[in-house]
Image (spheres, rainbow, N blue to C red):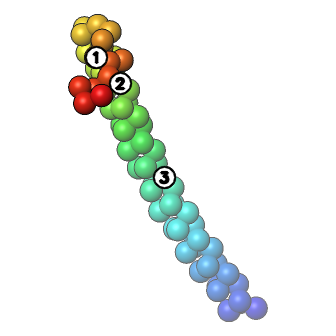
């Protein structure tokens, strides 16, 4: 019985370590995702600002010269 209990305790210890490692990975990935989303938003804001500075793009609705 004691040997069985030790095996179970060992497995639980390994599982706790694995859960802690996975938790660290998830936390790191969340930080990376937050940074990527923030950067994406800043780039979208810059694009919107550039588009508003240029004004409506008249050439967007014109046919290319080869037509």
- Whether residue 37 sits left or right of residue 64 in the image: it is right
| Circle 2 residue | 44
| Circle 3 residue | 26
Q: Does residue 41 sit above or below 48 in this rendering?
A: below
Q: Would residue 56 be visible to someone looking at this image? A: yes
Classify mark 1: helix, strand or loop.
Answer: helix
Residue 12, given in percent of the width and then of the height, sits at 63, 73
Q: Residue at x 23, y 25 (%)?
A: 65
Quadrant of the rendered image containing residue 15: bottom right
Q: Does residue 39 sit above or below 27 in this rendering?
A: above
Badge 3 density bin: few <14, some 14–19, many ≥20, Cα 10 Å: few
Q: Residue furthest right?
A: 1
Q: Residue at x 43, y 49 (%)?
A: 29
- Whether residue 10 sits left or right of residue 29 in the image: it is right
Q: Would residue 42 be visible to someone looking at this image? A: no
> Gap in Å between the C-alphas at discs 1 and 3?
46 Å
Front position among marks 1 and 3: 1
Q: Which of disc 2 and disc 1 is earlier in sequence?
A: 2
| Circle 1 residue | 59
Q: Nearer the viewer, residue 26 or 65?
A: 65
> Gap in Å between the C-alphas at discs 1 and 2?
22 Å
> Gap in Å between the C-alphas at discs 3 and 2?
26 Å
- The quarter of the rendered structure image containing the C terminus is top left
Residue 11, given in percent of the width and then of the height, sits at 61, 79
Q: Residue at x 57, y 67 (%)?
A: 16
- Whether residue 3 sits left or right of residue 60 in the image: it is right
């Amino acid at each position: 019985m004691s040997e069985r209990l030790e095996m179970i305790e060992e497995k639980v210890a390994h599982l706790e370590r694995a859960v802690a490692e996975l938790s660290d990975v998830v936390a790191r990935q969340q930080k990376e995702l937050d940074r990527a989303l923030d950067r994406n938003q800043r780039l979208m804001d810059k694009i919107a600002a550039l588009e508003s500075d240029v004004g409506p793009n008249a050439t967007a609705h014109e046919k290319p010269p080869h037509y």
